[in-house]
Image (cartoon, rainbow, N blue to C red):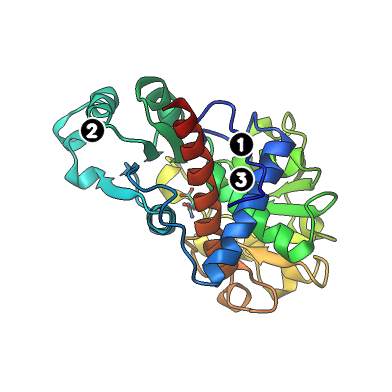
Amino acid sequence: MSGFSYPILPSGHLLAIEGLEPPHISALLDLAESYALLNRQGKTQRDLLKGRTLINLFFEDSTRTRTSFELAGKRLGADIVNMSVSTSSVNKGETLLDTAATLNAMHTDLLVIRHAQSGAPALLAQKVDAAVINAGDGTHEHPTQALLDALTIRRRKGRLENLIVAICGDVLHSRVARSNIHLLSAMGARVRVVGPPTLMPSECARLGVEVHHDMRAGLDGADVVMMLRLQRERMNSGLVPSPREFFRFYGLDAAKLAHAKPDAIVMHPGPMNRGVEIDSAVADDAARSVIGEQVEMGVAVRMAVLDVLARALRRNA
Ligand code: NCD
């Protein structure tokens, strides 16, 4: 887009929110906002990534994230290949680094990777010529999710600064929570984490967030209530009682939401466990829930990230 000052991601990759400065974040959000507008008008920019190859390399399940990277790449004109673990040689014992060598030989420009191991995208970034985008690594980070969440909040509330954001539930296993804590704190929001002690990471104090174990206190006066999925696939022991018990204390229903501000918005990155961390009536309440808008902003944010990283590639070409 013309007349726009493009943010530069210093590493040439997007591996984490931690380490990004507020001006980088704001500029990415501004660019994503303009893509959101184009998307609503049904306009595309198919020459921007023309001739560029984007590989979606997913070692973990995904619906929203993989699809929205694919849509974002297509709207900018890239050639896209989706590789998922079940169809790749990784199942035949190929290491991540062998996979990297293969991708390099294919002259991949943009590599989107999701992996169960924290740090896998950073390792690949050292080994491939492509710009690497972390689409979620273990419990570490999910930077594009935090960007799309921030864009959604900014559109609804007009700002991020001084908002009270309550991030609730399984914080321990959530890369979404970690990326959001870094981004929202950097942008001047007041972040609270709310959940049972067994699902709170010890680094919360270091990250400078307020910790609550009671939903009523945690939600009191909040502008934004962000629910997280109970990530049972990452739990190796009984960290929570039954799902019913979890819902009773930490599931978001109308009664608990009443403690937040009357105009508080409700968010969830998906996929949702309805009746476990969130009541369907709240998730589907069009007056409060912005879950659909989060998905919409996901495409715009990923277009912005691909655009910025591809421009840097062009400079180096
Ligand atoms: C999140 C993820 O994969 O980290 N999902 C997503 O990208 N929308 C959250 C989750 O799996 O609970």
Mark 2, residue position: 106
Point out the tag, 2 or 3, that comes first from the N-terminus. 2
Q: Tell me: 118 left or right of 22.
A: left
Residue kind at label 1, given as amino acid type: Ile
For the point 36% across and 36% down, the residue is 109
Mark 3, residue position: 177
Point out the tag, 1 or 2, that comes first from the N-terminus. 1
- Between 6 and 303, the one lying in front of the other is 6
* Percent coordinates x, y for residue 42 in the rendering: 49, 71
Q: Please give the label number shown on residue 200.
A: none
Residue kind at label 2, given as amino acid type: Met
* Percent coordinates x, y for residue 229 in the rendering: 52, 55
Q: Is residue 57 above or below residue 165?
A: above
Q: Is residue 147 above or below residue 267?
A: above
Say whether residue 100 is visible.
Answer: yes
Q: Count neighbours of disc 1 (C-alpha within 10 A) and say few if under 14, some if 14 to 19, many if 20 or more.
A: many
